[in-house]
Amino acid sequence: MINLFKVKEKRKELAENANGRPPVKKQSAGELRLHKDISELNLPKTCGISFPNGKDDLMNFEVTIRPDEGYYMGGTFLFSFQISPIYPHEAPKVKCKTKVYHPNIDLEGNVCLNILREDWKPVLSINTIIYGLFHLFTEPNHEDPLNHDAAAVLRDNPKLFESNVRRAMAGGYVGQTFFPRCV
Amino acid sequence: MVSIEPSRSRDLDKLLLRPGNIVAPTFEAGAQLREDIKEYVRILVVGAGGLGCELLKDLALSGFRNLEVIDMDRIEVTNLNRQFLFRHEDVGNPKADVAAKRVMERVSGVDIIPHFCRIEDKPLDFYNDFNIIVLGLDSIEARSYINSVACGFLEYDADDNPRQETIKPMVDGGTEGFKGHARVIVPGVTPCFECTIWLFPPQVKFPLCTLAETPRTAAHCIEYAHLIKWNEVHSGKAFDPDNPDHMQWVYSEAVKRAELFGIPGVTYSLTQGVVKNIIPAIASTNAIISAACALETLKMVSGCSKTLSNYLTYNGVEGLHTKVTEFVKDKDCLVCGPGVLLELDTSITLKKFIDLLEDHPKLLIAKASITYRGKNLYMQAPPVLEEMTRSNLDITLFELMDKIPEDTIHATGLAGKGETKQSSLRKLRVVFKGLDGVTDVDMAGGA
């Protein structure tokens, strides 16, 4: 319980001494946990990370993936990460900033990766997500499509899918859609 | 001394004017206590919504005189069924202002100061001014923020015992439909919000590919319109859930989607519910939970009875069920825990400090990364951050901590010995030696 006597004294004190400490920045528990995730990152050579707002803003960053095998070898794909103050209670918001012909990434940059939504758990980390994203490029999956057309081509005609991917990455049209060069 | 005269709240007097057996050790029954509560106790109510309206009324009727309320929202028509301090003509006005005014009109003598702003907009000192903070919130983020602010005032002595005068107690209420909770948080004594954040179930999130390919429910159609279709059509324009035009657009797209797949049940109110994650509020749940919170506040302030220990759940879904659970603190909690006390010389460099963490018997943290009040002093990885922070290694920690003689910093690294090393994030209480009697002003000029 509160000691009312002390409360009274404190009131008086406050009245006499109004200048407190300078306002300080509050670091949320989410930021601290993110600091841990980031300081423990162990990325393969194919993945890079950058912090557009400098070393003290870890809540917004970008990840670059350069697959060294599979359909997307040689391409460069940029992802933006936005982290909530209640991370890891809530999963990071991840968008693909590079327009890509991919069954699990739509043309708006939405990514269908289970651990970003329905299967996110607080024990997972930024490292896990980056590996998950990398995996999407080595093993694109026609069973969880966000780009319906790309998924159908991958399923029915992998050769055509491969040449579509090549064309898109080199900068060109697949069907009606133009993809900027990303190799 | 004040002479004993009957107050307008006779029942309250039964609690405050008579001694008892289960009272707190410091409890002193009498009219003086009643007057002191009026005179000296200052309470902040966070939130002026369903719980906030009830809380303000309950606290005002429980003998508290000095109340303040903070809320960033304006009154909407849909609030009126349960936020009983508001009338139709109040729609569009700030909740805090109207709630304060209405309670002051009805309960004479009570003084309520409204704050129509975000909780983050107030300086930390604002929160330190209250004896108890009572929370009537609906989000984890807001609770987590207030909790970190209140726990931020907590100081520990050299034996890791909380300093009584720095404890800022909170009473937290929450409701969701027919369910609710009321809890007492005494930082350093009972678990804080962060110690038990796992109590909150994760939000249900549908896989994006289900939304795009195989919708089965009305909610799937709404989330498709909200998460996928919106961006497709309004490239770059952010969706604003509080903009009725935006909500109407999502609703009409969801209807089209539902028709395409032959799914029934998409309505405007369901659209709002899914997009804003709204669960229908039940007025009586708010009333029950607020009453429990107000009573705990009174008990904590006066000591007239034992307080709730420490988490009450209420469930009115089938019959009625309540239970009190005593949760325990996480002793290593980054927010309310004492952290490891380190006494340091002002001359220690960041590099030496990092070495010291590896040898410290209570820590044994190898390869530590250090963060201080949102500034990353040193990062072991990734290489880009290591490079940006490397130059700090030869600077003294004292300087990097802005020459503040005593403060909290955090270290991440691999803890333990040999095979059993595991990653660890620790709170450290750094005290610089030999600074007694030196004022901040002197240090800024010297050293």
Image: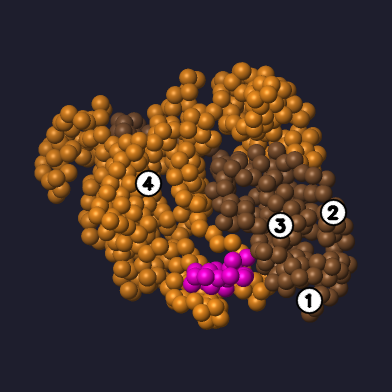
Which amino acid, mark 1? Thr
Marks 2 and 3 sit apart, C-alpha to C-alpha, by 23 Å
Image chain in orange:
B
Question: In front of the other: label 4 or label 2?
Answer: 2
The part of the image, by quadrant, that contains residue B281 is bottom left
Q: Residues within 10 Å of mark 2 (few under 14, many from 20)?
A: few
Which amino acid, mark 2? Glu
B145 lies left or right of B28? right
The quarter of the image holding the N terminus of chain B is top left
Marks 2 and 1 sit apart, C-alpha to C-alpha, by 25 Å
Q: Are marks 1 and 4 on the same chain?
A: no
Q: Chain of mark 4?
A: B
Residue A52 lies in the magenta stretch = no
Mark sitting earlier along the chain (2/3): 2
Q: Residue at x 62, y 70 (%)?
A: B212
Which amino acid, mark 4? Asp
Q: Chain of mark 3?
A: A
Q: Are marks 2 and 1 in contact (CB under 8 Å)?
A: no
> Residue B52: percent from the left, percent from the top?
35, 56
Mark number for residue B206?
A: none
Q: Are marks 3 and 4 in contact (CB under 8 Å)?
A: no
Mark number for residue A69?
A: 2
Q: In this figure, which residue is indicated by the disc labeled 1?
A: A177
> Residue B98: percent from the left, percent from the top?
34, 64
Q: Are marks 2 and 3 on the same chain?
A: yes
Image chain in brown:
A
Marks 4 and 2 sit apart, C-alpha to C-alpha, by 53 Å
Q: Residues within 10 Å of mark 1 (few under 14, many from 20)?
A: few
Q: Are marks 4 and 2 on the same chain?
A: no
Residue B214 lies in the magenta stretch = yes
SS of the residue at dot 4? strand
Looking at the picture, the colour scheme in use is: by chain
